[in-house]
Amino acid sequence: MEKVIAGQIEAYDTQKIKTFIEKGFRETGLAISGRILIKPNLLSGKLPDRAVTTHPVFLAGLIELLKDCSCTVYLGDSPGYESLERVLRTGQYTDMLDRLGVHITPFTGEFVKRIDGVSPYREFLFGEDPDRYDHILNVPKLKTHGMMGMTLAVKNTFGFIRGFTKGRWHLRAGTDKSLFASILVDIHRIVSPSISIIDGILGMSGDGPSNGTPVHLGLVALARNAISLDDFIEQRLCPELFHPVTECARANGLLKPYEVVDIGMAPVPPSFPMPKSCAADWNMPSPVKKLLRNIMVRKPKQNRKNCELCGICVKVCPAKAIHIEDDILQFDYAACIRCYCCQEMCPHDAIRV
């Protein structure tokens, strides 16, 4: 049976994180050696206390353990709109990575990967080839997500899709969360991480994944099967919500029974607010569901007090549904696919839903 290893760490402490991960490796029977690629969540260049990205101390604990095993360690991602170098510098990773001798790998290449999976699509263009490494270690941040409810281990591997080309997949899926979930599941299966380790010591609730509220959870968890890990987190924090990625995996026989190994698990928080944009998944025919979503699902709007008219929202919108006119953001809601990339990428918290 699959295992999810769950524990509690109250504050970012390199040694405690290292000890937890080492126990997790033993419990799951994972032997690590060779060329290792760490894939954290490096969405944008934010300070660690904003809870937008995987915390640098969390990564340091993992990297120290890998170095003890004589591994050659690489770290990479494809941030939303900034260069990887800038995100690492702004997020206070650079000195630590230099000290520990980690090779930085921007996902800027072109690698066509194929799968006969659960989505209608068979080819995906990656920015890095996971087959170049002996192990992929998937290290997401525990956060809410405006479109998908939560962004955890499976969605973190979407970062293998290069830069702005991520928007093409949002555009293909449109407002169909189930279709986008199937795309995420296929990408994750191509990446096929050896293990996923989630940083939930400081998580994000509310309007994540970049402008939500940092919340102390003290939760750390890992699993060889990322789908099991995601299900464990979702059932613990928001069991009443429809989770498209996990439900897609369940419907296709990819969510297997799993055992939770408790090594001092953090208590469940009294509340964990979800994004206001999270809509129910109505059990009705698709055409009716689509009509209701277009009418009832929240629309992105400009917060003029915070907006600096930087134009990032215009640049990242997959549907080209935003433009600036007379110093005001104009939204074409007929074209808007409610992916909330504009909110996700806004560095000024100037898009509200």
Image (spheres, rainbow, N blue to C red):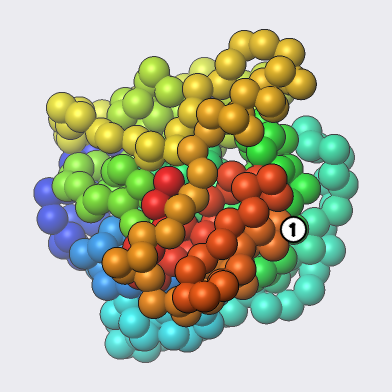
| Residue sticking out furthest to the top | 284
Query: Is 52 in front, or is 130?
Result: 52
| Rendered location of residue 69, percent (x, y) | 41, 67
Say what secondary structure mark 1 lies in: helix
Residue behind mark 1: 168
Q: Quadrant of residue 167?
A: bottom right
Left or right: residue 111 compared with residue 128: right
Residue drawn at 64 percent across, 54 percent down: 332
Question: Which x, y percent locates residue 102?
Answer: 44, 81
77 sits left or right of 266 in the view: right
Q: Residue at x 29, y 67 (%)?
A: 305
Of residues 240 and 234, the one nearer the viewer is: 240
- Identify which residue is drawn at 76% across, 21% down: 287
Residue 224 visible in the shown view? no
**Residue 91 in sight in this render:** yes
* Quarter holding residue 23: top left
Q: Is residue 13 above or below residue 265?
A: below
In the depicted structure, whether residue 349 falls above or below residue 171: below
Q: Where's residue 85, x and y in %?
A: 47, 85
